Image: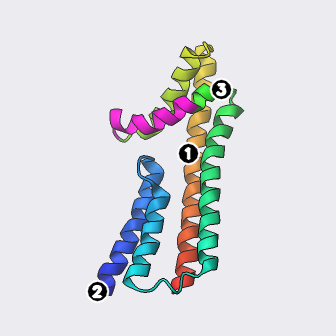
Amino acid sequence: MDILFWCLIVVSFVIAFVGLIYPIIPAVLFIYVGFILYGVFYDFGSMTFSFWVIQVLLTLLLFVADYASNLFGVKKYGGSKAAIWGSTIGLLVGPFIIPFAGIILGPFIGAVVAELLIHRKPFKKSVQVGVGSLLGFLGGAVMKGVLQAIMITVFLVYVL
């Protein structure tokens, strides 16, 4: 049964990393699912109060990193709040409209369209903002991936 239990825990962690690419999947939630599965299958005792404090702090840092990276990417290239919203909407809708490529093109197109339609910026400037949005998304995904790996490492240190 140990193999089955650990497979379920690992699968929940893997789904969390898939959530970095497909933001419709609540990545950090699946990390916590892995923690809870471990507690149910084995023991919550090894996950002490300090463990949960560290995990909550890392989760908050993950949310801040996600927001800040998108904001920084758009703002660095002169984008507006509308571009941030367009990028976010494109990130959520893109994968459904354009499978696989939509995850990259969605934030870019969303930011460009927002700048063109709402702020009437020139096409070249709107494309620059779209590039900033894309770079922000990719940077955020890397940062979130690192933070998720740290969360899982902390988990393993506490339970093994």
Left or right of residue 125, residue 99 in this image: left
Marks 3 and 2, Cα distance to the nearest angstrom? 53 Å
Marks 1 and 3, Cα distance to the nearest angstrom? 19 Å
Does residue 56 sit above or below 101 in this rendering? Answer: below
- For residue 122, say whether it is visible: yes
Sooner in the amino-acid sequence: mark 1 or mark 3:
3
Coordinates of residue 17 in the picture (x, y in percent): 45, 59
- Label 1–label 3 contact, CB within 8 A: no
Mark 2 burial class by Cα count in 10 Å: few <14, some 14-19, many 20+:
few
Coordinates of residue 148 in the picture (x, y in percent): 54, 63
Give the residue at mark 1: 138
Q: The residue tagged with tag 2: helix, strand or loop?
A: loop
Screen quadrant of the N terminus = bottom left
Does residue 126 sit above or below 43 in this rendering? Answer: above
Q: Is residue 89 magenta?
A: yes
Give the residue at mark 3: 80
- Which residues fall within the magenta stretch? 85-99
**What is the image's colouring?**
rainbow
Marks 2 and 1, Cα distance to the nearest angstrom? 38 Å
User: In terms of secondary structure, what is the magenta stretch mainly?
Assistant: helix
Q: Residue at x 45, y 86 (%)?
A: 43
- For residue 98, say whether it is visible: no
Disc 1 marks a residue whose amino acid type is Leu
